Image (cartoon, helix red, strand yellow):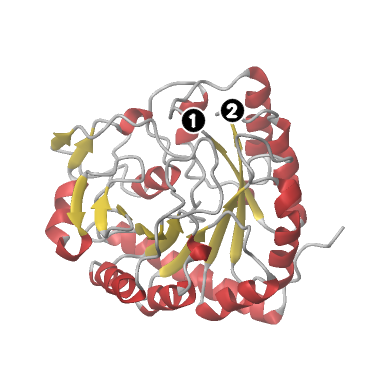
Amino acid sequence: MPAARKQTPVRRLKAASRKVRELALVGHALASTRHPVMAQIVPMRRCNLSCAYCNEYDDVSKPVPLDEMLRRIDHLGRLGTSIITISGGEPLLHPELDDIIRRIRHTGALAGMITNGYLLMPDRIERLNRAGLDHMQISIDNVQPDEVSKKSLKVLDKKLQFLAEYADFHVNINSVVGGGIKDPQDALTIGRRAMELGFTSTIGIIHDGDGQLKPLGDEERAVWDEMRSWNKKNYSRFNHFQEAIANGMPNDWRCRAGSRYLYICENGLVHYCSQQRGFPGVPLAEYTKADVKREFLTEKTCAPHCTVSCVHQVSYIDHWRAPQTSTISPGNAAGSEAGLINIRL
């Protein structure tokens, strides 16, 4: 069994630099509410998998042209965005992904990526290193592939070994319970393997193929509690909201989607999140700081039952200030896969 990733001088230097930048963005977020903290941007809607619970992919879309992606990233930079996370579909299918990552770093933002990991090979990981990727998250749903998900530890373990050996960026492995996952114990196996290889490990609650959520069963809850009891460095301190989800209860919080968090689809439109596409549905090129200010003060009626982890985490920064003075009722989707990318603040 391969040992945990080695902390080489290059990795230690990059990790220290990344931590300084992370702390700076936290300070900036606390000092000012006038900019997005995180934007999630889609350069490729197509995916090489078709997980039963996912509604964020197709098998036909072409990659967004590089020039257009660069324009979108530059505009996010003008808005002052601190973290830009690439998602999909499967972003590694985009033929010019490295240039997209470089442009994100050029704006001064942290560069993150959510991937299923299938296309990771040593040379591809080295290219991501050179491009300047800061964070990667892979969600692994089970130990053995089944009809719900092919994102299994059996298939991806070799990719994780490649990451442990070659990746200079931070890697988080997210496991899940709920939503048709057959064996809750798989999450423990996946989490332990992630930490064995030197990665961080998180756990999320997943919806089913109809977008519905149910309280965790006894076995799921036991797995959930055990993983949450592991060393806190392996679980984001900003995931307290998932306790209510685990109990089938609503959350009382101020969603800052459209302001502190932006979701930009492959068509270049700004949405509250992946599950509320169409709201506000404004082209990114026309999105201004006035829009950011308005949405900061707008209550979203879908918030109590939301499971979109990154929106909760980003909004937590401002939970104590600026009561929202207007209300909008977007669609009633229950939420996306709980993992997304976990911000290690």
* Rendered position, 329 above or below 107: above
Q: Position of residue 231 (x, y in %)?
A: 67, 46
- Give the quarter of the figure containing the N terminus: bottom right
As drawn, which residue projects farthest toward the front? Answer: 60
Q: Residues within 10 Å of mark 2 (few under 14, many from 20)?
A: some
As drawn, which residue projects farthest toward the right? Answer: 1
**Amino acid type, mark 2:** Gly
Disc nearer the start of the sequence (2/1): 2
**Amino acid type, mark 1:** Gly
Task: Residue under label 2, please give it.
Answer: 180
Task: Residue under label 1, please give it.
Answer: 209
Count of numbered marks: 2
Q: Position of residue 16 (x, y in %)?
A: 57, 73
Q: Secondary structure at mark 1?
A: loop
Describe residue 5's horizontal placement relative to residue 170 as left or right.
Answer: right
Q: Residue at x 67, y 57 (%)?
A: 199
Q: Position of residue 136 (x, y in %)?
A: 55, 61
* Rendered position, 167 above or below 140: below
* Rendered position, 116 above or below 134: above
